[in-house]
Image: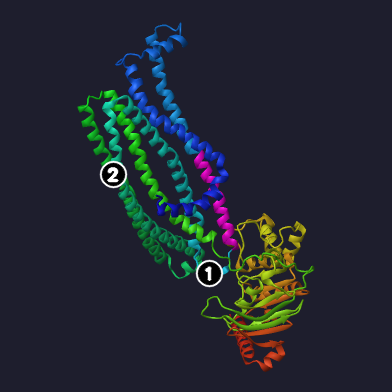
Amino acid sequence: MSNPNNEKLWDLYKPLVARYMVPQWYLLVGGVLSGVIAAASAGFGLPFMIQYVFPIVFGKDETPPWLQEWVNVHFAGMGDTAVTILWIAAIIIPIIMTVRGMATYFNTYLLTKAGMKALSRLRVDLFARLQWLSFSFHNKRTRGELMTVVIQYTQMVQQGMVGVMNDLVIQPLTLLAAVGYLVYAACTQHESAMLLGNLIISSLCIPVVRMVGKRMVKQMRQAMKGMNVITSVVEETFSAQREVRAFNLEQKRENLLLTQIRKYNGLIIRMNAWRQSVTPSVEIVTTLALAYSLYRGCSDGLSLEQFTAIATAFYFCYDPIKKLGAVANQCQLLTVGIDGINEVLHAVDETPEPANPAKLELPVAGVVDFQNVNFGYTEEKLVLKDVSVHVPAGQVVALVGPSGSGKTTFINLICRFYDVNDGCVKLDGVDVRDISRADRTRSIGLVSQFAALFHASIRENIHVGRPGADDEAVLTAARQARVDEFAEAFPEGYDHMLGEGGSGLSGGQRQRVSIARAFLKNAPVLILDEATSALDMKSEAAIQSELETLAKGHTTFVIAHRFSTIRMAQRILVFEDGRIIADGDHAGLYETCTLYRHLYDEQVRQEEDKTEQEVTA
């Protein structure tokens, strides 16, 4: 009867094996064949050599007549038959060991290569999947948790599956070969038949192995949660170095990391303690059986050569049993990594690609419609409530309101970073949920508050805006965003390499590179989400005219706290508590909307105070 636990394990492993290991079938076949040879040469070849070859080499047994006749026929004229037989017997020893060693090498090499190729594909698939999953999925998880899945869980599964496959090939075959020799010995030497019964003793190890496996899985699950926390602490600390140093948090972060590492180490130590308990448990049982075999063998008249050969065969029986026990526990541990991987691979995409995407008519005009839209990041609270608005093509619209009023959520829905709870968002009359990601991405340009640059050259970072653009277009966009003012000062010019996240540039310079991308992309819908927030007033004034030029002919949404930035807007939407409470131009809203007038007056007062302070300084 099949074991339901084993069936459950196989149900977990089967999709990963089929998708990632089966394509490496030629490496797996080579590894399995090598394992068969290694197992046969060890489990049967070594005991056979001890019983029949060693006695001939040391002259303790007479050479069998059939062997003398075979040597006389095939090696006639080579001298004394006994010497020839001695040479043949001696050569068999390195041949068997060489075959075993080479077969073991190729078994490990080929299976490891298959595992590494599978690991590479698995990591890329996980990385790609994470890039396509919705923002809702990412909002519920830390970066450290996702990094642990992509790097550590995959490494755990790769090492585990290669090790398991390796042992599942060599160990059972070695066991069968050794048992085969024992059967052969029992049939040819009646005094050794009773020794076969000692194999039954190994079944006493099974309950121990199962209990240890359950304990190990429990400790490993807790340990991987601890590793998620460690990764998050490190990533969070390195990404906030300015704040850490500004507030003297170095020691506090160090203590936090040390605490988490100690917890993790304790769990790993306990898990390894349980893992290592398998070996002595099996060895105690097997050595007791071997001691009993020694006593009975001597009583029944076994020779030293016979007993040594049978003892070696017993070793090649019990050693695989011991390792297969470890394999069983390794399979249990693999479930931890596979569960984490499957959580990503089978996660529900809350903004899925439409099965039959609707085609946007070219050229895309950029008409945006919100129709009775309700949206909340959680089920408990709506962030946008019954929002309906029509934005004609080419109109420049400013979004104004207190923090948390729904402005950024509004543009997130245009980009379809999230799907609405109710209602719909349309681009040129087509629901954004029915537009393919490629078409939607080509139609919308985004300059966000936090410029995300990559570890690449300035030129390459601008090129992100339109990968197919020629170098002249890239340089034109750079000049429009005033990137040339600082890029040409570097010895390498536009080929100057930036650090991670664009380090090496000031906040304003990073934002200019981001703006240059928008110039290069030239999408019909443009979103400026605090696009000039990192620029000082002088830099903002210098680039404002370029932004106005970029916005002409494009449907543009502008979010900014500084009202000077939205002066190019033809229309202003005022948000409060997830609703659009006013819609109009500056003059009309200043007269009719109390919230708008308050926000505007407060901004003017702050700018006047700042100007006065600068003059005084």
Magenta span covers which residues?
Answer: 110-132
Q: Which residue is mark 2?
A: 280
Query: Is residue 221 rendered to the left or right of residue 379?
Result: left
> Circle 2: is it few (<14), some (14-19), or many (20+) Cα within 10 Å?
few
What residue type is disc 2 on? Pro
**Which amino acid type corresponds to the residue marked 1 in the rendered image?**
Asn
Q: Is residue 160 left or right of residue 506?
A: left
Residue 588: percent from left, percent from top: 71, 91
**Reading the chain from its start, which is encountered first: label 1 or label 2?**
1
Where 590 falls versus 145 (above or below)? below
Towards the viewer: 506 or 105: 105
Residue 538, by quadrant, is bottom right
- Front-most of residues 331 and 383: 331
Where is residue 576, by image quadrant?
Answer: bottom right
For the view shown, which residue lies furthest in the bottom direction? 591
How many angstroms separate mark 1 from mark 2 (CA)?
46 Å
The image position of residue 606, as x and y in percent, is: 60, 85
Q: Which mark is residue 139?
A: 1
Name the dominant secondary structure of the magenta segment.
helix
